[in-house]
Amino acid sequence: MTDLVEQRAPSISRRVAAWAAVGLVVYVVAAYGSVLLVAAAEQAVLDPLGLGGEPGTSSWGVILAVHPIAWGVVTALAAGWIGGRLLPGAVHPGLGSAAHLGAGLAPAAVTVYLLHEFVRARYGWFDPEYTGFAIFAAPALVAIGLAGWAAAAIDREHRGALVALQVAALIGLAIALLPSLPGVQDGISPSSVPLAAVVVIDVAFAVGSTSAVLVSWLRRSAGCA
């Protein structure tokens, strides 16, 4: 029986790696698909109620902030369906997976909104070009949440490829935020405090989530060695 498990383990790990690769493609495609989904929901539900967002207003920031949530949920639903077929019986998302995903999508949405408000207050209009690399912080948080969601749905010894994705997303978040650090040396204005606070939360979540998944995988791998 032990020999059979040892023979199956590499096969499962390879299929998890294939799932991670397919999930990455789904993540990219869903980025655009979720934009259409949010736009369609806005036109069908919010516009008739007079609640639709207008560029240059705070309500537009709310619409933009919904996108990371839709992006993450659509990706998770599609990836979960694909994982059930690539790895029948091996993908079992539960409350832990949902917690990882929610913990990534919530700060991503808040970051988008506060970034929108920060740029709008400074320039009177929101243009992604005014945000610099910080605009990529939310996509990185979505990726970290999704990678944590997927890792939590798989037995720890097979999570290697998913852990690698989460570490890569953490590096992406660092690249997005590091260019903004020199500005901190000049001090943080009162109007920037909410955005600065959520960035701290973003980093704390990203490091904590990635470390938890990485340590869990390393301990399990060491125990199986």
Image (cartoon, rainbow, N blue to C red):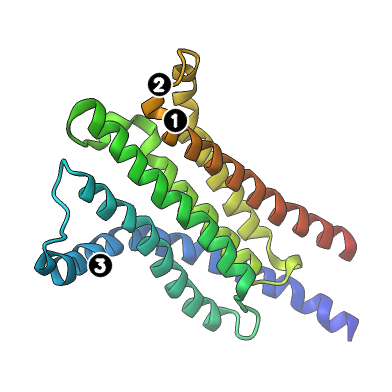
Q: Amino acid at mark 3?
A: Leu
Which residue corresponds to mark 3? 37
Of marks 1 and 3, which one's residue comes earlier in the chain?
A: 3
Q: What is the x, y in percent for residue 183?
A: 44, 18
Judged left or right of residue 64, residue 125 is left
Viewer-proximal residue, 128 or 125? Answer: 125
Which residue corresponds to mark 2? 189
Q: Is residue 134 above or below residue 160?
A: above
Q: Residue at the far front: name it.
A: 190
Judged left or right of residue 135, residue 214 is right
Residue at x 57%, y 40% (from the top left corner): 203
Residue at x 26%, y 47% (from the top left corner): 61
For the image, the number of numbered tags is: 3
Judged left or right of residue 46, residue 170 is right
Residue at x 33%, y 45% (from the top left corner): 113
Q: Is residue 216 above or below residue 184?
A: below
Categorize mark 3 by other alpha carbons within 10 Å: few (<14), some (14-19), many (20+): some
Residue 220, picture quadrant: bottom right
Quadrant (top left/top right/bottom left/bottom right) for the C terminus: bottom right
Q: What is the x, y in percent for residue 47?
A: 12, 64
